[in-house]
Amino acid sequence: MKKYTEIADINSIPEIIKEAIQLKSNPFQFEALGKHRTLVMLFFNSSLRTRLSTEKAAKNLGMYVTVLNVNDAWNLEYENGAIMNLNTAEHVKEAAQVISQYGDIIAIRAFPTLKDKAKDESEYIINSFIKYATVPIVSMESATAHPLQAMADAMTIEELKTKKRPKVVLTWAPHTKVLPQAVPNSFVKMMQNLDVDFSITHPKGYELNPEITKETPINYNQDEALKDADFVYAKNWCSYSEYGQILSTDNQWMLTKSKLSKAKFMHCLPVRRNVVVEDAVLDSEQSVVIQQANNRTYAAQIVLKKLLENL
Ligand code: AN0
Ligand code: CP
């Protein structure tokens, strides 16, 4: 593997998920692999899980870790040929090459603007680093994708499924803030590559990028969609067609214990209680969100392992 910024960077998805689950049972097996190697983590946005689990993953492989909250550094310019007489102090061309000398792998979290769709879809931050850095790049959630989260989610389903082809439903849920489509985008792509009966439910107007959802069934009736589900993944995202807009905060879409029925409940976290999902779900045995968060470590670890092996 040369980078991990999208699901398509993985050769064999079922294979890598098995390998990640194996690593979980023996996390220090490859602790010599990362000796004298450094992971630099660049954060343009907040994080709890990604920051701690990715650092733990790197340390399990024997790596050093350096974290930079980019907002504490110089404001970066991304445009080619820019006359930098305004607010940007350093061009990503220099920054990416410089950071490549300090880190053997660079991991980046860079959320979308949710205002300028074309700019967000260009993935200008992560793609500039892919272009100018001289070391592998890992996405810790970019404008349109969160592939480490999707890998942890797939591991969790693999660990918990009780039938060969479980029914998995991604449901939109209400939220008070404008949130990205990155988590659902990567989850959809991941599910399309696994042996699962997968569908999506959301109110009209919340269609994700149709190039991503492709042939995946979409049902606008949540009750119908959730029927006999084995796994229900709840997530809010803002409108894609009316980009960055909140079209509905209808709390009828909040996930409740009765809607969940016998299914396992999944969410990437952080989650707003009693807005996205009611307490009774999160506090029940059916919630697997803590296990999902644990799997973030081993998802990151298998990715770092594959990148280290290829250095
Ligand atoms: C972010 C999102 O929805 O993409 C990060 C989730 C991992 N969530 C929030 O900002 C609440
Ligand atoms: N799920 C996830 O990526 O969490 P953080 O935003 O806390 O890293």
Image (cartoon, rainbow, N blue to C red):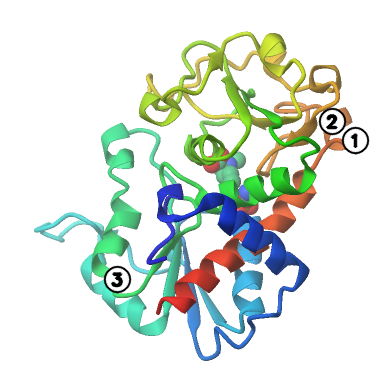
- Where does residue 285 sit, x and y in percent of width and height? 90, 38
* Image coords of residue 208 (percent x, y): 45, 25
Three-letter residue code for mark 1: Ser
- Read off the residue under disc 3: 133
Tell me the amino acid under the disc marked 2.
Val
Q: Looking at the rendering, which quadrant does residue 63 occupy?
A: bottom right
Quarter of the image that includes the C terminus: bottom left
Compute the Cα span from label 3 to label 2.
Answer: 44 Å
Can you identify the residue that label 2 sits on?
281
Q: Residue at x 60, y 68 (%)?
A: 301
The residue shown at (35%, 77%) is 99
Q: Label 3 is placed on what type of residue?
A: Ala
Residue located beneath label 1 in the image? 284
Q: Which mark identifies residue 169? A: none
Q: Is residue 220 left or right of residue 309?
A: right
Q: Is residue 229 visible?
A: yes
Q: Residues within 10 Å of mark 2 (few under 14, many from 20)?
A: many
Q: Are marks 1 and 2 in contact (CB under 8 Å)?
A: yes
**Disc 1 element:** loop
From this viewpoint, is residue 89 visible? no
Q: Sequence-wise, which precedes: disc 3 or disc 2?
A: 3
N-term-proximal mark, 1 vs 3: 3
As drawn, 105 above or below 230: below
The CA distance from mark 1 to mark 2 is 5 Å
Q: Nearer the viewer, residue 81 or 53?
A: 53
- Foreground pick, 295 / 245: 295
Q: Position of residue 110 (x, y in %)?
A: 43, 53
Q: Where, quadrant-wise, is the N terminus in this rendering?
A: bottom left
Q: Secondary structure at mark 2?
A: helix
Q: Secondary structure at mark 3?
A: loop
